[in-house]
Amino acid sequence: MRKFGILVKKELKELLTVSSLIPIILIMAIFYFLGNFIGEEIENEVNALENIRFALCDRDNSGLSREVADDLAAAGCDAVRVGDASEFEKDGLGFGIEIPNGFEQSILSGTPAKIKLYAGFESSSMTSSVDSAAMTAVGELINAIVSEKLMSLSLPQSDRSFLTNPVRTDEYTVFNGNVANVSAAEVQGKMMLQTLFLPIVLYLVIMLASQMLANSVANEKTDKTLETLLSAPVGRISILSAKMLAAGIVSLIYSVFYIIGYSWLMDGMYAPIGADGGVSEAMSILGLEFGVGVYALFGLQLFLSILCALALSLIIGILAADVKKVQSMIMPLMLVVMIPYFISLVSDILTFDTLPKLLIGAIPFTHSFTAVNAVMFGQMGWYWAGAAYQAVFVAVLMVAALKIIRSDAIFTFGGRPTAKKKKSLAFCRKV
Amino acid sequence: MKILEVDRLRKSYGEREAVKGISFDIEQGEIFALIGPNGAGKTTTLRMIATLLSPSGGDALLCGESIVKDPVHARENITYLPDEAGAYKNMKGIDYLRFMAELYADSKKRTAEMVEYASEVCGLGERLNDKISTYSKGMMRKLLITRAVMPAPKLAILDEPTSGLDVMNALEIRDLVKRLALGGTAFLISSHNMLEIEYLSERVAIISEGVIHDVGKPSLLKEKYGADNLEEVFAKIVGRNVWEGRAE
Ligand SMILES: Nc1ncnc2c1ncn2[C@@H]1O[C@H](COP(=O)(O)OP(=O)(O)OP(=O)(O)O)[C@@H](O)[C@H]1O
Ligand SMILES: [Mg+2]
């Protein structure tokens, strides 16, 4: 038992070092900040719900429709009168509602009447659906208003379901001036499905690439094959860029496999749902199709992020004394990738305020996570600025890596690579 | 002709000075050994000459080219075998030789010549077609030493080429080095095994704590210090220094 205790103590000492605890503490800190940060974002959105303004177009212009408008105002709704509800975005309004011609007539004749709801589409993320939530609420309010009026009239044919639900809604989505007869929620759902796996692929590929390269360099250090290469008549730039390029190619191959695999997963999961009730068609009307262009631009971003990760791991590999050290040195890199990964899972970085947006944008990997949304929602400035930033980042890191490998750091940083072996000290015996 | 001229070379790691201004020369085709205990500064010296570490002071000329001012050209005259080096484990021995040959050769023809020469000399025979991960320590060392000599460099720098090997393997490697030196390649070898080095090298430098205490042919050194072997020579030199140090 005593010996067992000694063994456990030794194991704990080896596993529980300061450098092994730092990553965990960092993760905790990141979770804490992310939680607060995202919470704030959601709160902002929810607050926005209270003073929402929308466009109202009354094509019926009947007694009933006018009463509805008055009651809405009385209920505190800020409805702005417009000629075309689908153009609510021009006036900076949240959404549009149209009361079509024949509204009153239809209600009085005892058949449910339809109103048209127009919602904009800004982002595919979870927290940005506040406008459409408000719109649904207003739609329900109109229904309640009309229902109340019908009840007070005590009409002869008192079909209960008609009395409680006299108004039906017909949802439209507006994007870039295109209008399609589909609800924003449906479009959003579809888009989320399509882009759901991309952050995961990104994260996995970046991690894989860095591990691969840093380990390979550290291994070459322990085996001293790197030392051998450095003493050969080959340029140091060639040695470094060959490693980068090879790791980059392998990572791209991995990404292709991952993406194919995930698309199979998605297809397999959603095949039973079958036809999507014209959502795909509506999305192509809106110009939200997930086409080759989007894939290509995403691919470019992915490659840039891989290069960033590789350049960083190259430096880590050169500096780390051995493969074990690589693991703890690569941890911070993983955490840095995790930040945009988590945020993009729950929210849309592109819709943030300037300061947080720039802060997160300072992490080069962020730009891969925002690439698809930036392309889809026309923020090409952000996309190209991010790409340029990453390119500069890679260049600076490569120059740094070159400087390091030309210096003594490879031998002197982080201690001596291999533990000193036992050697015969034959000649030191006795003087 | 002098292949290597080392002139007051020094190296510090932070505060600690590992090599304290050492000087020596190596002639063409000569086998020169740097002998001294663990931590004497042998590896540090060899790395500086192999242009991997930059000296803190002094210089060394490889065929007239300075390792400080022009490491890229100086490097072309040497090959270097690190202490306890390994090779790419997933490669076959022959593929490793070819890979390294391609780095040194400037034509396909030259590559083929190098590989052919190396496979003859290394003595691994059929095992060259096996993966390096299956090699014993002795086989690995033979492979690496052949790799280091196959480009026929002006100077081959071998850090402890026989350490950790059994007597038979060490003997074979000694013979290999001796044979290759006849071809005109000079060798700079480090070792802490003084008995072995006595038979191998033409001249030795005795290094301890970053200082070269004496340089010369083993026979002359033994005569000078009245010793039977190099081990005794070393003991006497270090002993005398200790004594002198105390006297001051
Ligand atoms: N990367 C390093 N950082 C700091 N000190 C170092 C480093 N490498 C070597 N040293 C120190 O420099 C001195 C000389 O080391 P060196 O490796 O050159 O000795 P050596 O003669 O090759 O020894 P050995 O026979 O054990 O290989 C030692 O005191 C060692 O601790
Ligand atoms: Mg050494």
Image (cartoon, coloured by chain):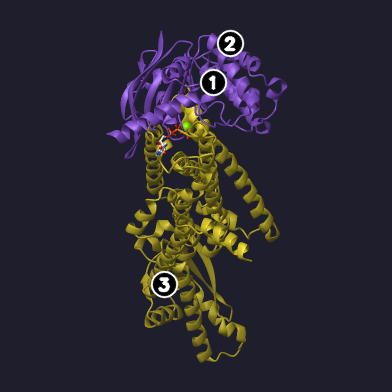
**Which chain wears purple?**
B
* Residues marked 2 and 3 touching at CB (< 8 Å): no
User: Helix or strand or loop: what does disc 1 sit on?
Assistant: helix
Q: Which residue is disc 1 drawn over?
A: B148
Q: Mark 3 to mark 1: distance in Å?
A: 71 Å
User: Helix or strand or loop: what does disc 3 sit on?
Assistant: helix
Q: Could you tell me which chain the residue with mark 3 belongs to? A: A
Question: Residue visible at 66% across and 31% down?
Answer: B136
Q: Nearer the viewer, mark 2 or mark 3?
A: 2
Q: Residues within 10 Å of mark 2 (few under 14, many from 20)?
A: few
User: Helix or strand or loop: what does disc 2 sit on?
Assistant: helix
Q: Position of residue B82 (x, y in %)?
A: 50, 29
Q: Mark 2 to mark 3: distance in Å?
A: 75 Å
Q: Which mark is residue A296?
A: none
Q: Which mark is residue B109?
A: 2
Q: Which residue is disc 3 drawn over?
A: A46
**Which chain wears yellow?**
A
Residue B214 in view (yes/no): yes
| B138 in relation to A176, above or below | above
Residue A123 in view (yes/no): no
In primary-sequence order, the first of circles 2 and 1 is 2
| Image quarter for ligand 1 | top left
| A253 in relation to A288, above or below | above
Quarter of the image with the C terminus of chain A in it: top left
Q: Position of residue A174 (x, y in %)?
A: 47, 59
* Residues marked 3 and 1 touching at CB (< 8 Å): no
Which amino acid lies under the numbered mark 1 shown in the image of this protein?
Answer: Ala
Is circle 2 on the same chain as circle 1?
A: yes
Q: Position of residue A7 (x, y in %)?
A: 59, 59
Quarter occupied by residue B127? top right
Question: Residue visible at 41% across and 41% down?
Answer: A413
Which amino acid lies under the numbered mark 2 shown in the image of this protein?
Answer: Lys
